[in-house]
Amino acid sequence: MIWLALDTVWRLFFLQGSRNGRTIDGLGFFHIMEPLVRRLAGRGQDRAEAAGRYAGYFNCNPLMSSYIVGALTRMELDSADEGGLDPRKAERITDTLSAALTARGDYFVEIVLLLVSLTIGSIFAIYTWYAGPVVFLILYNLYNFRIRIGGYRTGLHLGEGTGRVLAAKLLKEQKILGAVAAFSGGVLAALVVLRAWRFGGPRIAAAGVVLAAAAYFARGRMSPLKTAFLLLLAAGVFLALW
Amino acid sequence: MNPLLIASLVGGALSFEYRTSIRLYLSAPLVSGLILGLILGYPGLGLTAGLMMQLLFIGTVRLRGRPEADLPTAGVIASAAFIIVSRDLGRISPMSGLILFWSLLLGLMVAAAGSIFYTQWERFASRLAGRGLDMAAKGRTRTASAIHMALSLVHFAWGFLIIIIVLPPGLAAVKYLSTRIDVMSAGSMESIPFLIPVIAAGAILKLLSDRTRLFWFGAGFLFVAVFFVFGGGV
């Protein structure tokens, strides 16, 4: 069992390597499930049949997919003596869990976890230089590893019931981390405005606030890349003319 | 080793790290800038460029199915350009605003190129991934896995190639623009490292949609403001 777990866990970190427009991460998901398929084939199941259950479309947040892999592994091992998991059931579990976990996971990772760790890391980077990236890496990866490796274990433990437990757990942490992200965002905002004021006086601080307002209104209306281009150019033009 | 080769190798490795979903976020410009700076011997310069690139994109939410800026390569190329041009021009200061400005612009162009490349690549990879899945369904599971890992290597190749192709002309352009305009312009561009972080504050605020989070944002802001007034400055 330990070898199967190890062989699966390292593959979790390569899920999106073959991402494409049609099956999204389907091949990556199969790559993760491949050790299990080999194991099932070793127990007398038809290899092609076992593989066919996991050779299709897959679209899930890469961190959250560990729960699905864990849950499916548990269910496959439990039903190994009965000729393997019913393909329709395997598909239903994969689809249901990935839909539920992707919505929650994308929000948790993109809007809460990344924001809080990047904001705190940036504050440290602005003031104490090298500590910033280290603080960011520690904060983010604490959750990254906990969700991926812990997620696989939880899935393996709970099987089909994984989704509900995880959703409740994430919601609780999301609230606390969201408040921390907002507080650290406020700290960063005040620090950078005061810092700009100190360096260039009220004019630079005011220009910064105008550009910050522009960033506020542009986000969501324009792509992030276009917004970054325009804001950098606006800052450059302002300073060149000043 | 040649700094161009170093930057390309780092760019390839970090692109692989991000796109395959290893995603320890060593590829975040905040981190990659420092990594490149440490390797090239100017960590302060690398961190400054990386931090600024990161702050330009802070609060960005990746939407499924929408092209995203290729930040790993953008962070590496902006940091590499800032470090190498600063060193060549003898201006070893993280506050060298004009060089930083052009380096960031170069980084953003590479981010746009990466966005276009990956939109096309994901279409092209559909066929190959489809073949891999067909093989898997026929029981050739190891071959399917090998196809997956082979496709993953494209990310390293992209990161490596875009940097080694774009960096030499990019360095020449950044050097030219920094010296040429510097003759005429005032030192006001030195304010760039102070202006970009303020822009980031607006982007962060945008993400805080509900009242509770706005309350905590205000609390954080006031906390620093009070500390600044009564605590003798920041």
Image: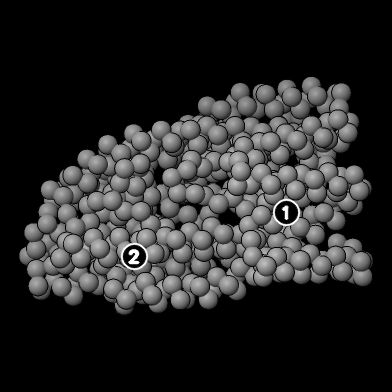
Q: Nearer the viewer, residue A80 or A228?
A: A228
- Is residue A14 shown left or right of residue B232? left
User: Seen in the image, is B29 located left or right of residue A85?
Assistant: right
Q: Position of residue A164 (x, y in %)?
A: 38, 75
- The residue lying at 55 percent from left, 34 percent from top is B112
Which amino acid type is shown beneath numbered disc 1?
Answer: Ala
Label 1: state its secondary structure: helix
Q: Which mark is residue A97?
A: 2
**Depth order, front residue of B133/A186:** A186
Q: Which mark is residue B99?
A: none
Residue A175 appears in view: yes
- Locate residue B108: give its quadrant: top right
Report the chain holding disc 1.
B
Number of callouts in the render? 2
Query: At numbered mark 2, what does the secondary structure look like: helix, strand or loop?
Result: helix
Question: Is residue A200 positioned above or below A229 on the image?
Answer: below
Q: From the viewer's perspective, is residue B184 above or below residue A63?
A: above
Numbered badge on residue B201: 1
Q: Between marks 2 and 1, how big is the CA–CA gap? A: 35 Å
- What type is the residue that disc 2 sits on? Leu
- Can you give x and y, in whole percent of width and height, for residue A46 in the image? 8, 59
Which residue shows up at 53% across the image and 57% down it? A110
Image quadrant in which you'd find residue A97: bottom left
Whether residue B180 sits left or right of residue A117 in the image: it is right
Residue A91 screen position, x and y as percent: 23, 60
Query: Is residue B118 depicted above or below B43 in this figure?
Result: above
- Report the quarter where the N terminus of chain A lies: bottom left
Q: Residue at x 57, y 63 (%)?
A: A112
Q: Say which quadrant the C terminus of chain A sits in.
A: top right
At horizontal 16% and vertical 67% (from top left) the residue drawn is A85
